[in-house]
């Protein structure tokens, strides 16, 4: 079928596949290095406890069939290995069917992780990676030209990511309509990056321009993805530019990077003149069937997207095949942070020797400048941001975190930047306090060298020890 292939997109597919393999590699690396403290047998939200109460049909996963920390580690590192092989181009050296099977492996492995990841894997980019990863299985390799339907569906995903994010903003916080959200967002975002302080101090008129440009890119430009070339390529390029701006302004895991990967698939390379071999009939049938399935499953996401009660980041099927997206429908005006401290004193008093635990990414010591971590995802640091917004977000795991700190649990301490206690001398008590953080001014930065100024608000968790029940305030 002449209409089945898009011969101008050979290079586009190659770039897309290698970039997606890189995102997969980062996702599996994050899982391999963090799972023991978060989800392991002694983790804060243990997988065995979750699968014992959750039927397979609701959360299909290899770990429903068997779980051990060693098995999870094997799956995560296997995902890293397969992703690295795809990044190196192994799929191009295999027969078409074998290449498709190879692309299916990381999807199955990551689906298995996400479906048992609970709170730690409740972010929209997890479903986005799975949706994009599933479609990548059917893009083919060097034996066939890229199928037009698969490329079209990649644009359909990109459209929903951008347009859904734009709609949730216009329907949400009024600061988006007033063009004032970025007066606060660079300061209150979940995990600032090394340039976020400077973005915050940009002139306010430029913040208005940022918001207006975001509205245009998310509410108007997505429709141009379905226009003829070169209009579609110009629309995708504009999205790439705006996503790179977001990469510079904060740490948003791999959300921006996978959006860029999607946009790359819409950029043709007309000078690519390699021959167009006929696709096998079985391959055409499989692609057509998958396309029909994904179009059918798009009903609920589209219905949600056009609804006045639009919700963000939700999957409508347990395989995360077609999802709904959106972010920052509301923007905090004030930044709060939970500061966790411990003491070795036998009796906890206000004047005891309280020592602060330092996290890798979230603000702590006002003099510590934020670092760049994205696309790597610091899951505990992100959830600490939610915990500061409301204790309700921390109800399932914060008590377990405190217990692990009281035990000097090695896996948990690896998630932190620094523990103030030696490995053989855990604290007697741990407490948590809520602080208000704000960026310093240019003058304050010069005088103190601190990028943050913080003010005590209230007690978040009273001094707690292992012999008592760990409760949150």
Image: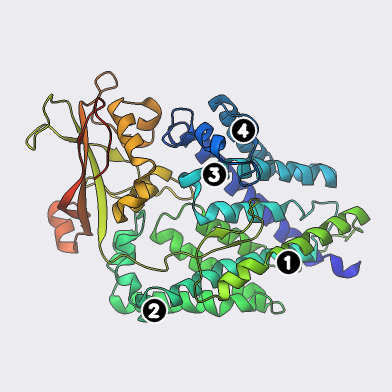
**On the image, numbered disc 4 is attached to which residue?**
75
Front tag of 4 and 3: 4
Mark 1 and mark 3 lie on one chain; the one further toward the N terminus is 3
Residue 426 higher or lower than 417, as above or below: above
Q: Secondary structure at mark 1?
A: helix
Residue 236 higher or lower than 454, as above or below: below
Give the residue drawn at x 92%, y 59%. 278
Quarter of the image that includes the N terminus: bottom right
Distance from the alpha carbon under mark 2 to that under mark 3: 33 Å
Distance from the alpha carbon under mark 1 to that under mark 4: 31 Å
Q: Is residue 366 visible?
A: no
Residue 76: percent from the left, percent from the top?
Answer: 58, 35
Distance from the alpha carbon under mark 2 to that under mark 1: 36 Å
Left or right: 132 in relation to 313: right
**On the image, numbered disc 3 is attached to which residue?**
26
Residue 325 higher or lower than 18, as above or below: below
Q: Secondary structure at mark 2?
A: helix
Mark 1 and mark 4 lie on one chain; the one further toward the N terminus is 4
**On the image, numbered disc 1 is attached to which residue?**
295
Asked whether 466 or 241 is in front, the reply is 466
Give the residue drawn at x 22%, y 59%. 438
Mark 4 and mark 3 lie on one chain; the one further toward the N terminus is 3
Using the image, tell me which numbered label, if any, was put on residue 209. 2
Residue extending furthest toward the top: 424
């Amino acid at each position: 079928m002449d209409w089945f292939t898009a011969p101008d997109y050979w290079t586009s597919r190659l770039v897309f596949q290698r970039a997606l393999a890189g995102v997969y590699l980062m996702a599996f690396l994050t899982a391999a290095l963090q799972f023991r403290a978060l989800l392991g047998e002694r983790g804060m939200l243990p997988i065995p406890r979750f699968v014992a109460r959750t039927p397979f049909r609701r959360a299909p996963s290899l770990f429903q069939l068997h779980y051990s920390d060693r098995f999870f580690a094997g799956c995560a590192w296997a995902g890293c290995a397969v992703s690295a092989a795809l990044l190196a181009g192994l799929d191009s050296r295999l027969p078409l069917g074998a290449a498709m099977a190879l692309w299916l492996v990381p999807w199955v492995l990551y689906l298995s992780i996400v479906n048992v990841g609970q709170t730690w894997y409740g972010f929209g980019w997890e479903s986005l990676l799975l949706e994009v990863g599933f479609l990548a299985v059917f893009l083919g390799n060097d034996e066939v030209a890229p199928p037009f339907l698969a490329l079209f569906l990649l644009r359909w995903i990109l459209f929903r990511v951008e347009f859904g994010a734009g709609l949730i903003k216009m329907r949400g916080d009024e600061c988006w309509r007033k063009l004032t959200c970025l007066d606060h967002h660079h300061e209150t975002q979940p995990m600032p990056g090394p340039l976020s302080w400077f973005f915050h101090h940009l002139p306010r008129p430029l913040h208005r321009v940022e918001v207006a440009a975001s509205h245009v890119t998310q509410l108007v430009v997505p429709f141009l993805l379905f226009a003829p070339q070169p209009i579609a390529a110009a629309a995708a390029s504009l999205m790439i530019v705006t996503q790179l701006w977001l990469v510079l302004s904060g740490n948003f895991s791999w959300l921006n990077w996978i959006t860029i990967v999607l946009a790359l698939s819409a950029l043709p390379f007309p000078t690519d003149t390699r021959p167009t071999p006929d696709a096998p009939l079985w391959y055409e049938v499989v692609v057509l069937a998958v396309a029909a399935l994904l179009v059918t499953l798009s009903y609920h996401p589209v219905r949600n997207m056009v609804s006045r009660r639009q919700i963000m980041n939700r999957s409508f099927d347990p395989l995360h095949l077609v999802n709904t997206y959106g972010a920052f429908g509301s923007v905090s005006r004030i930044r709060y942070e939970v500061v966790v401290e411990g003491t070795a004193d036998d009796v906890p008093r206000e004047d005891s020797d309280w020592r602060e635990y330092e996290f890798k990414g979230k603000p702590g010591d006002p003099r510590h400048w934020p670092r760049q971590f994205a696309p790597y995802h610091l899951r505990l640091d992100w959830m600490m941001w939610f915990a500061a917004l409301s204790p309700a977000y921390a109800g399932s795991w914060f008590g377990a975190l405190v217990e692990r700190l009281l035990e000097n649990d090695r896996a948990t301490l690896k998630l932190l930047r620094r523990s103030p206690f030696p490995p053989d001398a855990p604290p007697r008590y741990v407490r948590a306090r809520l602080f208000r953080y704000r960026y310093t001014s240019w003058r304050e930065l010069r005088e103190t060298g601190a990028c943050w100024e913080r003010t005590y608000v209230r007690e978040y968790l009273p001094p707690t020890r292992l012999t008592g029940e760990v409760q949150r305030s």
